[in-house]
Image (cartoon, rainbow, N blue to C red):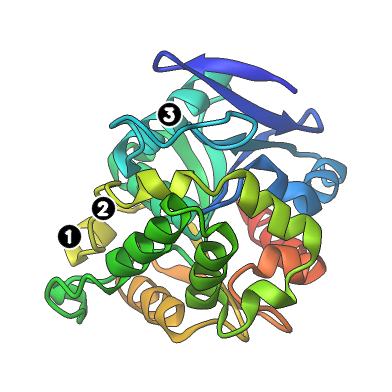
Amino acid sequence: MPSTSLNGHEIHFAEAGSGPPVVMVHGTLQDQRYWAPQMAPLAAAGFRPLALSLRHFWPEQWDGVGDDFTIAQHMEDTAAFIRGLNAGPVRLIGHSRGGHIAFRLAAAYPELLHQLVLAEPGGELDETLGGEPASGKQAGVFAQAAGMIRAGQLEEGLSFFADYTGGAGAWGRRPEPRRQVARDNARTLLGQVNENRKPYGLAAVRQVVTPTLLVGGALTQPQFNVILAAMEQHLPNGAGRVTIPRATHSMSLENPADFNAAVLGFFSKG
């Protein structure tokens, strides 16, 4: 498994192909393995997909101690990875929490990106985008799930979090290999409680000038559609938006054929 040192930390990744790079950033309780259904199709289409395992995620075995598990740190690590490719502006795909990281990177470092895909970016909206003032609902979910994991109630904590992102009973519906990936990354939820994830605001959305595709699942939870709608309305250069049928929040896993077709169709325009 290849790795590289970024900002003083060893970061592992998977790669395939030899064309223009496509950097992919996973979400909560995931790692580079999340993007397995995208690796071969992107490589076959002439790209070089690179799937990161962010700082403290599998294969690293983190104890949950430290202050470097933040949105800002993961964003800076991803930016450093892109710079280290020495390939010019890249295509970037982020899912869920990884979509939040990709969004922040696009706002901070537009020169690093050629195209951007945001697959149900996680977070909340502030009042400038119609959100509730300091609702804290998401942070409360993180804290409750993390508390269960800290107390040794691993399956209960993971099930509670899965219900928030995938709907009631989501944990039980997931195949065992997918549940094992979450177990492998369970202690990252301890860091996520204090990750300093800011809500999306109108000013930040207007900073994202990279051509962007917004992707959602047809069966997803309502909170994700609210974010996609706000971004679709306010991204300054407009944004394409596609809905993946027969899929919830993890649409790139649940319906990879349609997800890959949508992404490749978007890439063909750039």
Residue 86 in sight: no
Residue annotated with mark 2: 207
Residue at 50% across / 53% down in the picture? 152
Name the spot of residue 110 as percent of width and height, x first: 36, 40
Q: Quadrant of the N terminus?
A: top right
| Callout 1 touching callout 2 (CB < 8 Å) | yes
Specify few, some or many for label 2: CA neighbours under 10 Å numbering under 14, 14-19, or 20 or more.
some
Residue at 29% x, 71% y: name it. 234
Q: Looking at this view, is 76 or 49 the one in front? A: 76
Badge 2 marks a residue whose secondary structure is loop
Question: Looking at the image, is mark 2 or mark 3 earlier in the sequence?
Answer: 3
Q: Position of residue 119 (x, y in %)?
A: 54, 63
**Nearer the observer, 117 or 119:** 119
In space, the residues marked 2 and 3 are separated at their CA atoms by 20 Å
Say which amino acid is labelled 3: Asp
Residue 27, relative to residue 199: is it above or below?
A: above
Residue 243, image x, y percentages: 61, 79
Disc 1 to disc 3, how far (Cα)?
Answer: 23 Å
Question: Camera-side residue: 148 or 118?
Answer: 148
The residue wearing badge 1 is: 203
Mark 3 = which residue? 77
The 10 Å Cα crowd at callout 1, few under 14, some 14 to 19, many 20 or more, is: few
Q: Nearer the viewer, mark 2 or mark 3?
A: 3
Q: Amino acid at mark 1?
A: Ala
Circle 2: residue type: Gln
The answer to whether 54 appears left or right of 65 in the picture is right
